[in-house]
Structure formats: structure tokens, C-alpha cells
Image (spheres, rainbow, N blue to C red):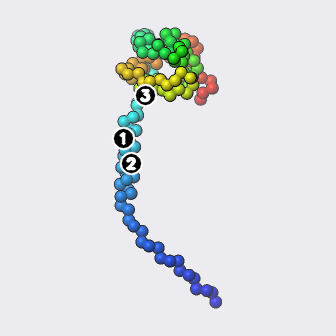
């Protein structure tokens, strides 16, 4: 004859937690709002229009040259843009937008952090990027071979 099985003790009834779905929903909504407020639309590269490039050059000289050099070769306070690190496949035009809007934590160079640059619109930065890209192309910098 087999032994009678012992019954497991009864579990106490689970407490209902109707607030859990609300908390999860509120957290998800807050995350969506945060992303929507901080996300910037991807900037489309501006065509190589000579007038746009000339305007970008003036904006660069006024806002960027003090650190990145009049000749884009950098200074003691900022890195050169005529370097493969700034080729379009390594730092996209959107990277310029983000740097101007939010500043940069140094990751290639030892120049210290870059502060945001107030007063420039996304269109201004796109023009600056068009100027930088035209100078890079003239210097033969079109792609960073070490970067996917």
C-alpha cells in the first residue's frame, strides 16, 4: 500500500494590487514625454550650394573658429575638424547639431568639455556643417576607414 500524500499547506490569499498597472502606465507615459521633449529631429545635410557654404563659413568664423581654428586645424582649446574623426561616417551632421545644442564630453581629444553654443539655430548649424564638409572634401577627408 502506498502512503497517503501530504498536502501542502494552503497559501494565504493574494492581496490584489490594482495600483501596479497605473504605476507602470504613468512611468511609460513619462518616458514617452521625456523622449519626445529631448529628441531632436535628424538634420538633413544641406546640398553643396556655394551660397550656403559661404554663409556657413561666416557662421563658423564667428562661432567656432576660436576653438577649432580659422583653418579648421584646431587650436590649443579645440580639436581640428580636418581630421578623419570628423569624417561624416564617424561624426554625422547630427553630431554637430548635438554638440552645439548640448555641449560635448571629450572622447577623442584632451581639450576638456565643449559647452553648448547659444544663439545658433539648427539651420545655422546645418550651414556650418555644410562648410566643414566642403573643406573636408577639399582636403580628401570623406570617410574614416577605421569606423563602420
Looking at this view, name the residue that lies furthest to the bottom: 1
- The residue positioned 53% from the left and 80% from the top of the image is 7
27 left or right of 144 in image: left
Q: Position of residue 121 (x, y in %)?
A: 37, 22
Position of the N terminus by quadrant: bottom right
Res 6 visible: yes
x and y percent of residue 104 in the render? Answer: 48, 26
Helix, strand or loop under label 2? helix
- Residue occupied by mark 1: 33
Separation of residues labelled 3 and 2 (CA atoms): 25 Å
Q: Quadrant of residue 101?
A: top left
Image: 37 above or below 87: below
Q: Residue at x 35, y 54 (%)?
A: 22
First reached walking from the N terminus: tag 3 or tag 1 = 1
Q: Is residue 52 visible?
A: no
Residue 88 image label = none
User: How many numbered dots are placed on residues in this image?
Assistant: 3
Mark 2 and mark 1 lie on one chain; the one further toward the N terminus is 2
Residue that label 2 marks: 27
The C terminus: image quadrant: top right
Q: Quadrant of residue 36?
A: top left
In the picture of the structure, the residue carrying the numbered disc 3 is 102
Is 5 placed above or below 47 here?
below
Residue at point 39%, 47% (across, down): 28
In this view, the mark in front (3 or 1): 3
Q: Position of residue 72 (x, y in %)?
A: 52, 13
Amino acid at each position: 500500500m502506498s502512503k497517503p500524500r501530504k498536502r501542502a499547506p494552503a497559501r494565504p490569499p493574494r492581496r490584489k494590487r490594482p495600483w501596479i498597472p497605473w504605476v507602470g502606465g504613468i512611468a511609460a507615459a513619462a518616458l514617452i514625454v521625456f523622449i519626445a521633449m529631448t529628441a531632436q529631429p535628424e538634420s538633413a545635410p544641406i546640398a553643396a550650394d556655394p551660397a550656403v557654404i559661404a554663409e556657413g563659413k561666416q557662421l563658423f568664423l564667428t562661432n567656432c573658429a576660436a576653438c577649432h581654428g580659422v583653418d579648421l586645424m584646431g587650436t590649443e582649446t579645440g580639436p581640428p575638424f580636418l581630421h578623419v574623426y570628423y569624417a561624416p561616417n564617424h561624426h554625422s551632421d547630427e553630431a554637430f547639431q548635438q554638440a552645439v545644442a548640448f555641449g560635448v564630453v571629450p572622447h577623442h581629444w584632451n581639450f576638456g568639455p565643449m559647452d553648448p553654443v547659444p544663439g545658433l539655430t539648427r539651420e545655422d548649424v546645418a550651414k556650418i556643417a555644410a562648410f566643414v564638409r566642403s573643406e573636408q572634401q577639399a582636403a580628401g577627408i570623406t570617410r574614416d576607414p577605421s569606423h563602420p
